[in-house]
Image: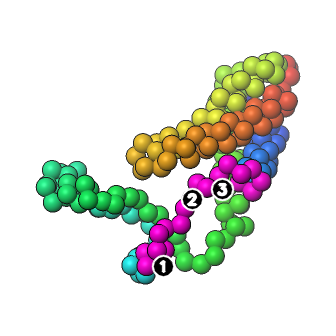
């Protein structure tokens, strides 16, 4: 067994590499540029929302699944639109805070990978085996939640596939860091 403490360098290097890779993915690569669209008649929609507090909303809204049996509720769904909205707090996004939280997430994911791989792989495991195991865990950790968003919240599958590609890139750099810094025997 390899302890998480013995993998601190791999955890930090992987977190930094994922942070850098995600910056490249979102600021340099073009594949996410059309993921978000403006609403038709945006100003009217914003005015209609008024003072909606930050939170997650769905429409038409149902308090319970039992309401779906009601003809008037079914009719609202059939008429549409049907959607999900996340309302953020007012003001310019705080990129410093968001980047800090994202970096903390990358450390948490890397530490989780270290924990699992440390129990699965002994010291001295060859680079490719460490790469394969840690890369698989990283890909699942960074990407698979997007699949649930498509299934339950109508996120476009094209966006999910791009996020899975991004997660694959994060997995490659994570696996490389762990493979490179995996402890030798003894």
Q: Quadrant of the N terminus?
A: top right
Q: Is residue 179 above or below residue 160?
A: above
Residue lying at 61% horizontally and 44% vertically, measured from the top left: 163
Q: Quadrant of the C terminus?
A: top right
Residue 8 in percent (x, y) is at 79, 40
Task: Give the mark nearer the N terminus: 1 vs 3.
Answer: 3
Residue lying at 66% horizontally and 22% vertically, measured from the top left: 120
Q: Which residues are magenta?
A: 26-45
Query: Residue at label 2?
Result: 36
Q: Looking at the rendered structure, which numbered label has been put on residue 29?
A: none
Q: Looking at the rendered structure, which numbered label has been put on residue 43?
A: 1
Residue 32 in percent (x, y) is at 65, 52
Q: Is residue 8 visible?
A: no
Q: Residues within 10 Å of mark 1 (few under 14, many from 20)?
A: few
Query: Residue at label 3?
Result: 33
Measure the alpha-carbon separation of dots 1 and 2. Answer: 17 Å
Camera-nearest residue between 102 and 79: 79
Q: Is residue 162 visible?
A: yes
Q: Check if mark 2's residue and mark 3's residue have beta carbons within 8 Å.
A: no
Residue lying at 77% horizontally and 47% vertically, measured from the top left: 21
Task: Give the mark nearer the N terminus: 1 vs 2.
Answer: 2
Helix, strand or loop under label 3? loop
> What is the quadrant of residue 99 in the picture?
bottom right
- The kind of secondary structure the magenta stretch mainly shows is loop
Left or right position of 90 against 28: left
Residue lying at 72% horizontally and 38% vertically, measured from the top left: 169
> What is the quadrant of residue 116 in the picture?
top right
């Amino acid at each position: 067994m390899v302890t998480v403490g013995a993998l601190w360098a791999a955890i930090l290097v992987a977190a930094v590499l994922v942070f850098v890779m995600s910056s490249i993915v979102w600021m340099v690569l073009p594949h996410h540029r059309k993921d978000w669209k403006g609403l038709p008649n945006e100003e009217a929609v914003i005015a209609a929302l008024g003072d909606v507090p930050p939170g997650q909303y769905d429409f038409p809204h149902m308090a319970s699944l039992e309401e779906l049996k009601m003809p008037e509720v079914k009719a609202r769904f059939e008429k549409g639109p049907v959607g999900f909205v996340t309302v953020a707090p007012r003001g310019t996004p705080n990129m410093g805070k968001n980047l800090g939280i994202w970096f903390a997430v990358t450390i948490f994911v890397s530490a989780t990978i270290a924990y699992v791989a440390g129990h699965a792989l002994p010291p001295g495991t060859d680079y490719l085996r460490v790469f394969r195991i840690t890369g698989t865990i990283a890909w699942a950790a960074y990407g698979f939640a997007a699949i649930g968003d498509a299934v339950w919240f109508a996120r476009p599958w094209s966006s999910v596939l791009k996020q899975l590609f991004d997660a694959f890139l994060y997995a490659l750099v994570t696996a490389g860091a762990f493979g490179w810094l995996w402890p030798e025997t003894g």
